[in-house]
Amino acid sequence: MMWRLFCTLLFGYLLFVAYRFYMHSQPVTAIDLRQYHMVQTDKLDLAVVWPEGDDKAGYVKAVKLVVEAMNAEGLGRCQILDQDTLALVGNQECKTKTLKLNIYAEPADRKAAVKQAKKIAGNLNTLAVLGYYRSDAAIPAAAVYEYKGVLMLSSGSTNVKLTQYDFKHIFRNAANDDSNAEILAKYIHDQGYINVYVIYERDLYGTDFSNYFIEHAIAIGLRVPTHTFYEENTKDFLPVLSSLRSKIRPINLTDEIALLQAKLQRAKRILQIAQLSATGDDASIIQFLTFEQKQKNGNNRFFDSMPRVKLLQYLQQELEQSSSTAYLEALFHSHQKELSSLAREEQYVKLEQVDAELQMWIDRVKSVQAHSISPTSAPPLLANERLTIRKVIDLDAGDVLLKLEQMQKRVSKIKSGKVDAIFIAGFTPEVALAISQARGLNIDLPIFGGHPLIELKNHCKTQNNCASYGDVYALETHDVNEYRMAYNATLQGVVPTEVCAEGEENCLPERYACPHFKTAYTRFQGFATAYQQRYGIEPDNWAIQGYLAASMIQETLRASHTFEPEVIADTLLYKGNSEFADKGLMFSCNSHGITEGDILVEEMKIHRLGDLLKGS
């Protein structure tokens, strides 16, 4: 018995020794070293990798202000007070840390970006890295930071791939190319344009962004007659622009009017079905369904004996059939055949008729919406009946009204002949040269692009040729003037609206109609005041991005109560947006991160540069 007990104890001891030997024999990783060092050191570094130049200098200036505030507040925690003696337990000194800001110029190529990232990550004091304007540098650098356990928060890289690798330490607070392309395509379509000609720089940003744009543009109903590219450092855009101009052709008036008639007829049918489902009696629904059945399969009156729930289900089927692409195509071909026999003057008469009918239906839908605000008395419905009706009403007046208004804008574009636009994806100075040379060739189409076009405001001032850029629209992450106007609107008790008309002052967009907006504005205003006192100017788009990025690090440190990169990354990932909303860092009601690494990502907005450029 004693022998067995001795053997058991000996075997257990040997297992314990083997386990300890195994654990101590495991290699120490770079992340382990960093974790240990961060706890011990009193000095921490925050790296910023950002392009040099006055046009983007606001980013670094903003980060400096936030870092100064963090150091003034004090990084670290004092020992916990003993509640009985109200004395410090243990060491009576607070263990504070100092955060030093290291600024690096963003490299122009991938190899240099990797080399620089290794240098930054090789410094064990590096707590986090902010910045990275271009994806060409951000993506290769991200692999280095992930391996070394350095938290990275990019404020400029828009490539979708940056946060799609399941990395634990890589984040961004800028919307990606897919999201931005969808916003631009929808805006151009909703303004009534028909053709979009695509020009892009053949690099990582230009190629990906233009591909996403073409995909969304075609899906939403825009036409892309041609897409052409230029190489980096191009100075002469004459071949590219000449090729583009040769593809610009007048629209097919027959097809455009036929499509408008088909869309209007479909919209009227959807509204009719929705109205029947909401207010029509059984007899009206049966009459409609019987007529439709007769058109398809001959006379069939089996609807007469059906209960209302069944009738509504058949209405739902009619609605789904009416919303299909096949139904629209059938209507289009029917109207196309009719219009092809008309002279051009007669087709314009048809266009005027479509325009008048659109306005009539827009007024009718708005009237219905106004009356539907006050509830009307109706007999009680069964649960499944309410569900069926709801399914039909979901495709009701609101969506149809937007489509009718978009069609009206399309009619206006056709009448004016201004149906074409240009989409360009590239960086300054090449994109500035391309636009300037296009205007020199009398290519005066409106030009749309991503956030790099915002740099034209500064570029045109230095080059003193602002008027040559013409009508340009760019995506902008944050608009200080809009933010201020929205705050003033809240003070005046303005009712939120989804869309603010251009130049409208007493207006509160829906994205600001949320509980934490006033807190966010108050906090930002404190930063903006300090920024203007220090630098003599208001914070621009990039300064706001820098303020948000550095403030996210600040709030994440507060929430995590540690300087271990692994814990900080987990805190940012799992508590980020909820913490930021409470702390007043949300510039809109919701972020729309596509992947887990997209933190506090807010939808970009269309900003018209034309007037600013001409007035500079």
Image (cartoon, rainbow, N blue to C red):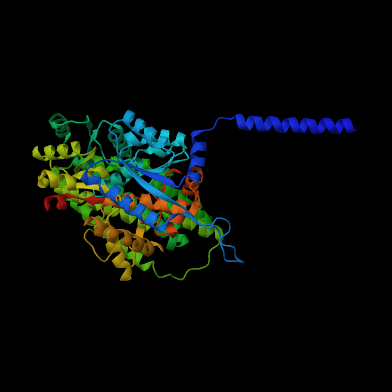
The location of residue 10, given as percent across then percent down, is 79, 31
Residue at 44% across / 61% down in the picture?
278
User: Is 602 placed left or right of 13 in the picture?
Assistant: left
Q: Residue at x 76, y 33 (%)?
A: 12
Q: Is residue 450 above or below residue 357?
A: above
Relative side of 484 to 13, left or right = left
571 or 354, nearer to the observer: 571
Q: Residue at x 23, y 62 (%)?
A: 504
Residue 365, located in which quarter of the rendered image? bottom left
Q: Which residue is situated farthest in the front direction here?
A: 92
State which quarter of the image contains the N terminus. top right
Do we see residue 342 in this rendering? yes
Instruction: Name, please, the residue furthest toward the right.
Output: 1
> How many discs mark residues in the rendered view?
0
Q: Does residue 188 appear to the left or right of 266 in the view shown?
A: left
Quarter of the view holding residue 482: bottom left
> Looking at the rendering, which quadrant does residue 107 occupy?
top left
Between 576 and 267, the one nearer to me in the picture: 576
Residue 433: x and y in percent read: 15, 37
Q: Which one is in front, 305 or 408?
A: 408
Q: Position of residue 307 (x, y in %)?
A: 54, 57
Is residue 291 shown to the viewer in this render? no
> Residue 146, position in %: x, y?
45, 36
